[in-house]
Image (cartoon, rainbow, N blue to C red):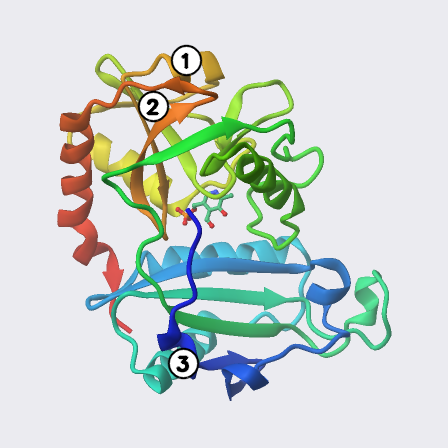
Amino acid sequence: MLQEYNPKNKNIFIHVNGELLPRDQAKVSVFDSIVQNGDGVWEGLRVYPEGIVCYDKHLTRLQEGAHALSYEGVPTKEEIKKAIKETLDANGMNNDTHIRLTLTRGDKVTSGMDARLNQSGCCLIVLAEWKKKVYDFSKGIRAISSSIRRSIPAFLDSKIHHNNMLSLVIAKIHANIAGYDAAVMLDERGFVAELNDTNLFMLKGDTVFTPFAHACLPGITRQTFIDLLKENKMKVQERDLSLVEFINADLVFATGTNGEITPVTEMDGREIKCNMKFLEKIKNLFESKLSSLCEPL
Ligand SMILES: Cc1ncc(COP(=O)(O)O)c(C=O)c1O
């Protein structure tokens, strides 16, 4: 799905390193670690009239990623929330908004890779934009498997939501060239990990399956759906799953904060069954729970 420029975002204010700046002045230094080394962690948050969905969980994942990467001067949750509130207030946003929250290792005293060159703490960026949910639920998405493998902890642990995203970007380029919406990424053994930007689930018989979070981002929406299925006495299991199992499933769907839930209708040129009744049911369960998942600003 190709996102489009929304003219409503022309004059937005963006929080960069403690300052609220108009869009055309919102910049990081060329010495910032994100420019030098792709060294940052990020979250995608959605704003609803009731607040931000799973707010605390997103901030925890950001801070834990920063801790795992030995960032210094990581802002507290209160400081991050203050920056987010200031940004949303400055733009009059309280719905249909996506926030790209980024924390970089910050400026280096000279260009290089060594983290000891970072002597002034992290840089926090709050980019809030007017944005509708990215996927069209009624159409679903078509996916194709990529030759690029999703990283396992032996290389770069997918549990860190980092900005070192080139493997995902290349997989998405493969999907674009092939005329598909998304890339299915496998782990190093050939089992399905996730799509390039969302987590995957499949239904077979009466059980919903999802890959272990060994080689995928442990998505917050993924966990919400696992909990929701369990609360509603439906069978759900994490296990190794192959492409063949996905292709022959009764339903495949993708989850993520920015698209919530969407069916995957085709994989590698094979049409996938779509148990619409089941999909509608869990979508409705999610929507009825949404306001209780939101934390007011
Ligand atoms: C690679 C990848 N997988 C899955 C997701 C979905 O995660 P969440 O449900 O936490 O938004 C994202 C979101 O950024 C992602 O980048």
Q: Which residue is mark 2?
A: 202
Q: Which residue is mark 1?
A: 245
Q: Quadrant of residue 98?
A: bottom left
Q: Residue 85: horizontal and vertical position, in percent?
A: 36, 79
Q: Which residue is mark 3?
A: 87
**Type of the residue with mark 3:** Thr
Q: Nearer the viewer, residue 10 or 118?
A: 10
* Element type at mark 3: helix
Q: Residue 261: horizontal and vertical position, in percent?
A: 29, 41
Question: Which quadrant of the rendered structure holds the C terminus?
Answer: bottom left
Q: Earlier in the sequence, mark 2 or mark 1?
A: 2
User: Label 3, label 1: how many angstroms apart (C-alpha)?
Assistant: 44 Å
Tell me if label 2 and label 1 are in contact, CB under 8 Å: yes
**Type of the residue with mark 2:** Met
Near mark 3 (Cα within 10 A), the count class, few <14, some 14-19 or many ≥20, is many
User: Label 2, label 1: how many angstroms apart (C-alpha)?
Assistant: 9 Å
